[in-house]
Amino acid sequence: MHWMRPILTDSGGYQVFSLKSLRKITEEGVRFRSPFDGSEVELTPEDSMDVQLKLGSDIAMALDDCTAHPATASETRESMERSMRWASRSHAHYHREEPPGGLFGIVQGGMHAALRLASLESLMRLDWPGLAVGGLAVGEPDEERLRMLETLVPHMPADRPRYLMGVGRPEDIVAAVLRGIDIFDCVMPTRHARNGHLFTSSGVINIRNSAHQADLGPIDPACACYTCRNYTRSYLRHLDRCNEILGCRLNTLHNLHFYLELMRSLRTAIAQGRLGAWAGGYLAARKAAGPVA
């Protein structure tokens, strides 16, 4: 990949979750049909570890069964307990020799607090350098996700990274940091960029809207990214309408810069002991920004 910086890889659990109509889950692992050529693929916890080890991942993830939402308590328990058995197999296979990085376990349990805590208890029987919260941001209301974090995170080890998988929107990241989460991942910055949705200090804009056709200003006057320093909204809209790949690249640079600045601001607020005040102001501003412009 020629990427000489830290690498975090997922195990494939969420990707299997997203291929629900093409896969079959068994105790051994997952069998699914490739969405590209229809060929059958088998993925076991051991297969997932082998791939991540070959990639030299600094942070690898145990293979899990991502529980759908909504799900009954019995369905959630079955899925969670399978994930815990797969976690043990992942851990054993990953540590056969000295690994290049660290393997994180993933807490599952859906929207059921007792199952979340049981999952965490099961994982804590093994040594993990960090733990992730999986199975959130899969369609549940925001308030349910926050309720689950408020229940679970205080029981997670405070001396190890706590990783919320699949989140997300800037306001969701800030709300989760307030509840003790350290690490996030999401396709949103790049996927939004490809679809013309750009994050700014005053809300999200859709560069495809006609309001930007003759706008010679930057995406965000408060932004110092390469795109904002060199290109106008009008030109970016033109690139998008022409399906020019340069537009996707420039939009992506901007959105990634926005997220990097958000995380820098969060780290600074934490270091200065003013996270609560900073987050309160930030969330109020995001709410006031309203819908996409």
Image (cartoon, rainbow, N blue to C red):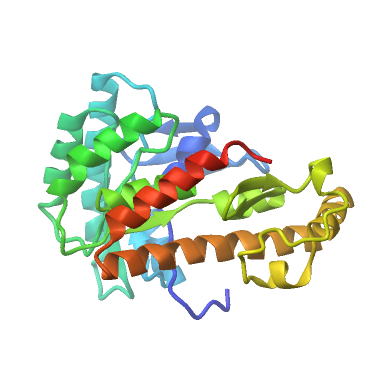
Residue 46 is at least partly visible in this image: no
Quarter that holds the C terminus: top right
User: Residue 217 or 115: which is nearer the viewer?
Assistant: 217
Q: Give the residue drawn at x 49%, y 66%.
A: 261
The residue sitting at 14% across, 37% down in the picture is 118
Q: Quadrant of the N terminus?
A: bottom right
Compared with 193, 54 (above or below) is: below
Residue 292 locus on image (x, y percent): 64, 39
Residue 50 drawn above or below residue 165? below
Locate residue 234 relative to residue 82 in the image: left or right: right
Res 10 → quadrant = bottom left
Spot occupied by residue 130 in the image (x, y as percentages of width and height): 24, 60
Q: Residue at x 24, y 20 (%)?
A: 74
Residue 286 appears at what percent x and percent y?
50, 45
**Is 104 located above or below residue 231 in the figure?**
above
Residue in view at x 35 percent, y 46 percent:
175
State left or right for residue 188 relative to residue 159.
right
Q: Nearer the viewer, residue 19 or 211?
A: 211
